[in-house]
Image: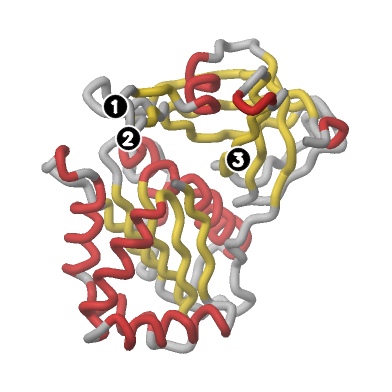
Amino acid sequence: MHLESSCDAVIKSSTRISPESADEVRQLVLQIDDPTFRYAAGQSIGVLVPGPHAFGNEYHHRRYSIANPIQTGNSEALELEILVRRCFYLDEISGEQYPGIASNYLCDAKIGDKLKITGPFRSPFKIPANKSSNLLMIGTGTGIAPFRAFVRQIYDQHGSWDGQVRLFYGDNGGMNLLYMNDEKKDLGQYYDDETFKAFSALTDRPLTGVESGLQDSLTDNAEECKKLITDPNTYVFLGGQEKAAEVFNKVMEETFGSADAWNQQKQSLIEKDRWAELLYH
């Protein structure tokens, strides 16, 4: 780890955005006083958690997507937002549960605490040059963070978008309440744009996980997804847990008639730079 490429950040606010009945998800606002630090919408930062850690590592490094668009104005202090879900991991052999190092470190941090961060790192999500391009986005959990910045950048820069914009999002942690409603005036502000549609795939079956809700929503709209995907002017973006990609692939295999047919279509998207993903375990 090259600490010379890191800088300090101070936690300005830490807000739980999920209900008490769901996994804890927090929105952290970080203040950075380093005048050389600049970022673009959709990029990510790394958080260095001081050790010692397993295998003798001095720091544990974990990346988080920047959730807010580029900051404008003349303020010397720069602020950025990240979403953090408190994670725990189960040892398959012992059955013991262990806290995720970075997520618990950040969720437990207090206002005024200092963090050491790295980056920013380039986002795989790039706005197409042609405003008539269609955008198909699929994600789960905190994977909405890069999409949030991505969509806001599109409408901030262009005012509107001529192509179809579709966001399929599965969550049971409360991010939909922060980002997907009219009251907050976040992604909800784009609902009036006739080209933008967001499908918040919430499930009322908590034991089955958010994947079931996402799968149901995709299945209900499978033909529209297929129509968009086979349009040479469509770009596909996946974000969040790897299970989101698994669900999407499963639904598309059924929609295209077979795994081979879908894999062939998917490979074509990849080769033509019309496929991008930002996934985590």
Residue matched to label 3: 63
* Neighbours of disc 3 within 10 Å: few (<14), some (14-19), many (20+): some
The amino acid type, in three-letter code, at marker 2 is Glu
Measure the C-alpha gap from mark 1 to mark 3: 27 Å
* Neighbours of disc 2 within 10 Å: few (<14), some (14-19), many (20+): few
Residue matched to label 1: 95
Residue matched to label 2: 92
Quarter of the view holding residue 216: bottom left
Q: Which sits in the foreground, 193 or 13?
A: 13
Measure the C-alpha gap from mark 1 to mark 2: 5 Å
Q: Residue at x 57, y 83 (%)?
A: 271
The amino acid type, in three-letter code, at marker 1 is Gly
Q: Are marks 1 and 2 in contact (CB under 8 Å)?
A: yes
Q: Residue at x 29, y 50 (%)?
A: 170
Considering the image in quadrants, where does the N terminus appear? top right
Q: Which sits in the foreground, 192 or 233?
A: 233
The amino acid type, in three-letter code, at marker 3 is Arg
Nearest to N terminus: mark 1 or mark 3: 3
